[in-house]
Amino acid sequence: MGQGAVDADLTAQIAERVRAAYAQGTPLAIVGGGSKLWLGRRVEGEPLEIGGHRGVVRYEPSELILSARAGTPLAEIEALLAAHGQCLPFEPPHYAAGATLGGTVACNLSGPARPYRGACRDYVLGVRIVDGQGEVLRFGGEVMKNVAGYDLARLMAGAQGTLGVLLEISLKVLPRPQAELTLALELDAARALAQFNAWAAQPLPITAAAHVGERAYVRLAGAEAAVRAARLKLGGEELADGAAFWRSLRELTHGFFSAAGSLWRLALPPATPVEQGLHQCLDWGGGLRWVLSEAPLWDHAAARGGHATCYRGGRTAVFQPLPPALLALHQRLKRALDPARLLNPGRLYPEL
Amino acid sequence: MSASHDPQRREALIRGLGEILPPDAVLYEHEDLRPYECDGLSAYRRLPLAVALPSTRAQVAAILRLCHRLAVPVVARGAGTGLSGGALPLTDGLLLSLARLNRILAIDPTARIARVEPGVRNLAVSEAARPYGLYYAPDPSSQIACTIGGNVAENAGGVHCLKYGLTVHNVLRLTVLTVEGEELVFGSEALDAPGYDLLALTIGSEGLLGVVVEASLRLLPLPERQQVVLAAFDEVGRAAAAVGAIIAAGIVPAGLEMMDNLAIRAAEDYVHAGYPVEAAAILLVELDGTNAEVSEQVMQVRELLLACGATEVRTARDEAERELMWKGRKAAFPAVGRISPDYYCMDGTIPRGRLPEVLAGIAALSREYGLPVANVFHAGDGNLHPLILYDANRPGELERTEELGRKILELCVAAGGTVTGEHGVGVEKLDAMCVQFTAPELARFHAVKHAFDPAGLLNPGKAVPSLARCAEFGAMHVHRGQLRHAELPRF
């Protein structure tokens, strides 16, 4: 769906498609904007297009809540929020034009602000889904606090459509910071990491910290006065176009990512020492490490208390293997919501 | 046959527990069981078959294996401060107290993580982190007593969740024992984990999916400065509008609380916080951050409050006054307890914009039932705590109170809200769940429970009503927002 597409509620049609697939045992490959087809294992199934199911359903800026259909382009939501001085605080990557809200939540994608302002899943308040039997269900809601029933809304974040087809998502949104600036400091990776962790333990208005090449980058955001005070404290030199830098890191378009080879995403406890001899850059204040490596890094990440994702270059094994007992629980959970194993089968793991 | 009517199974359980635990950690005599008969919702009381008080993870695992083998249900309990009966014992079940698993295993100031056992008290985490300039953000009002295990079970909130989130936003990793006593790790000390978000699923699951034996908690830097602004209003609607105005101005206060006149008077009488007792409502607005930031926002908030018709706006002069202002709010429940023989605390959440209309509805219901209702709530996130004042000694009054409570929750659901914002469903809101969820939704909850606990031994009968119960309650056809007889005026 391109710009200017008409908002439409296709709930009935999508549910009918899933019911028919359930009756016939046809696996379905869910497609939104197609911007993240590569992020996950290849799915064998009939395409289930949800891009036409789009439109913001409710947005009340003073409530800090936005509800939109899954096929709504992320760019459209961000523009609407910006017009009201608000934002998605987890600043999700798009990866390509046409990225939808549904795909973003299904993949639980969060940008550089993640350690400081929370992940995509942290902002999910409620969902409407079609489960594997074609039933339309709602979990969570359009309120900030809700502990009625199990948190199946957040469970959908990161499940990549394997537990239900996302129809509508309600998110908490926040005001955009009044002021924002990015500092660059000449530091090697190890010293930058130590600095990131030390700063994170202090009341500073940091909303992003990364290390690429031989430089550390820190973004300050918040009230005018707080940003000014922190800028003096941290030193370094102010970047002319900080927003462009963070965008390039978030969208993986920075020069670092243009090198050939498999790209690995390592989520590690943020104080994990920087490994020498790896071609890597640091985001999330050290909690996220992008590594170019031909050798698999599953064991490397697990040994350090984290996990690895083969972000580019792997279609058969993408995500960190799960311990057997945990995998068995995943399989039982999959059966609970998609008993015939029809929704994006195999996208996360061959067994799901 | 249930174990309570099966002396052999009871005997086997007590004998088995004796092999796992020292004698002082197994209780089964009537008088020893008494202290465990209820949690914070004391209207419901039951004695369990026995109480186990393990102090190690290995003991918990052995107890679960024993109960699994004997098919004895298990109810886990922290400090017993919950308000929905989640830790109410089962007459044929074991009450598993985790209070003795109370060690803070590590405070890691570099990674900003606290690793704790489930019986550690909420406030104890912040106290242990304080020397490093760190704290644990969720602060339910029972934080002096309530435990992290209980906080996880209920997804506890507190007065600071608008800005800092709930338990689910502040727990990184859980070590959980399954009903078979198998150890699983959900989440990670990294910022995410592979596979499904079982961490989010477990948090708020009210002890139905597993037993938490260790938690890694995210610690935050203590703010440089905290300041509280108190505003008085001569009309509740104006106070509610002021809440919206503050947020619309781009300010997210650390806390944003509201009390109505009845609550103000009760609290003032109890702690002498200096509240304006003639006000129809007061707002407490807490701002935190750097020095410069807080100064700037205090000025902004003062102006907004005055523009919204506040009759008085006051800023705490010092830390002592700030604490006093909060003390009145945090003591509001016991304060109401002093002016009424009994009170019943509700916990609905609504979209904030519907506040004036829902409050008017509650006032009308209060008049209809002839029972006073004091309102204390987390206005910033629309979480209401109406307190119904009643006297359990008057015949029929408890029943009328519960009916009024249900009506209030139906009002919340009709306004697009939920029957519980932070206290949990427990045994208390099972019927209300039938109003909020459809039969297929409830069926999926049961399916999730089955995936974790096929034999249904962990806290059975709580949190999610059976479909049969809902059919009996007669509410299955009351679909979201569609109250029965919608044509009738309700307030």
Image: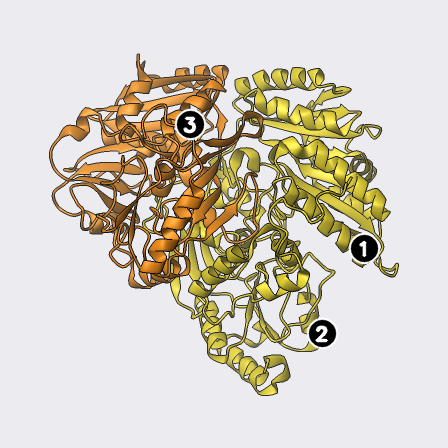
Outermost residue on the bottom side: it is B8
Q: Is residue B231 left or right of residue A156?
A: right
Q: Quadrant of the N terminus of chain B?
A: bottom right
The kind of residue on which mark 2 rests is Glu
Q: How far apart are labels 2 and 1 at the CA level?
A: 32 Å
Residue at the disc numbered 2: B31
Whether residue A88 is visible here, answered yes or no, is yes
**Callout 1: SS:** helix
Mark 2 vs mark 1: in front:
1
Residue A227, horizontal then vertical, whole percent: 44, 18
Residue occupying image coordinates x 45% and y 37%: A9
Q: Is residue B99 left or right of residue A279?
A: right
Query: Is B170 in front, or is B357?
Result: B357
Q: Colour of chain B?
A: yellow
Rendered image quadrant of residue A310: top left
Q: How far apart are labels 3 and 2 at the CA level?
A: 61 Å
Badge 3 crowding class, 10 Å Cα cut-off, few under 14, some 14 to 19, many 20 or more, is many
Q: In the rendered image of this protein, does residue A67 appear above or below residue A79? A: below
Please give the letter of the chain rendered in orange: A
Badge 2 crowding class, 10 Å Cα cut-off, few under 14, some 14 to 19, many 20 or more, is few
Badge 2: chain ID: B
The kind of residue on which mark 3 rests is Ile
Kindly indicate whether the residues beneath marks 2 and 1 are on one polypeptide chain: yes
Q: Is residue B473 left or right of residue B367?
A: left
Residue B50, horizontal then vertical, whole percent: 61, 75
Badge 3: chain ID: A
Residue occupying image coordinates x 70% and y 70%: B34
Outermost residue on the right side: it is B394
Residue at the disc numbered 3: A77
Residue at the disc numbered 1: B400
Rendered image quadrant of residue B274: top right
Residue occupying image coordinates x 35% and y 17%: A235
